[in-house]
Image (cartoon, grey):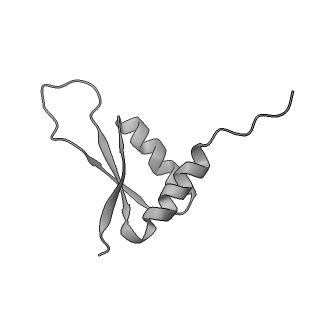
């Protein structure tokens, strides 16, 4: 099995799933895992680690950057 490395830490499950969807569209498989032990008494979101295969780390970073840049504004 290939080594998984951390690409990012998302502030919530929703944010992590958005990053995972972006990577999937780019053809890169990502795995999500909790970044901290979840306290059963805690409410709300917890940080989530976004993991990718080590060999795809650079491509994943490039994909996230390319897919999250705002579109160039059209001249007015």
Residue 69 placement, left or right of 17: right
Q: How many marks?
A: 0
Residue at 40% over, 43% down: 16
Question: In which quadrant will I find the C terminus?
Answer: top right
Residue at 48% over, 42% down: 18
In the image, residue 57 lies at what x, y percent?
Answer: 43, 63
Question: In which quadrant will I find the N terminus?
Answer: bottom left
Instruction: Give the farthest residue toward the front.
Output: 75
To which quarter of the image does residue 48 belong? Answer: top left
In the image, residue 52 lies at what x, y percent?
Answer: 38, 61
Residue at 85% over, 32% down: 75
To which quarter of the image does residue 13 belong? Answer: top left
Residue at 49% over, 56% down: 61
Residue 28 placement, left or right of 68: left
Instruction: Give the farthest residue toward the right.
Output: 76
From where the camera sits, is residue 67 visible? yes
Residue 26 placement, left or right of 42: right
Q: Give the answer, above or below, for where 65 lies relative to 57.
A: above
To which quarter of the image does residue 73 belong? Answer: top right
From where the camera sits, is residue 24 visible? no
Q: Give the answer, above or below, for where 46 lies relative to 26.
A: above
In the image, residue 58 lies at what x, y percent?
Answer: 47, 63
Q: Give the answer, above or below, for where 27 lies relative to 74.
A: below
């Amino acid at each position: 099995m290939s080594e998984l490395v951390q690409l990012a830490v998302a502030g919530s499950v929703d944010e992590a799933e958005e990053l995972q969807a972006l990577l999937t569209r780019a053809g890169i498989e990502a795995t999500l895992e909790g970044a901290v032990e979840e306290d059963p008494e805690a409410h709300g979101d917890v940080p989530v680690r976004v993991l990718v295969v080590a060999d795809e780390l650079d491509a994943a970073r490039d994909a996230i950057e390319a897919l999250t840049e705002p579109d160039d504004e059209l001249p007015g």
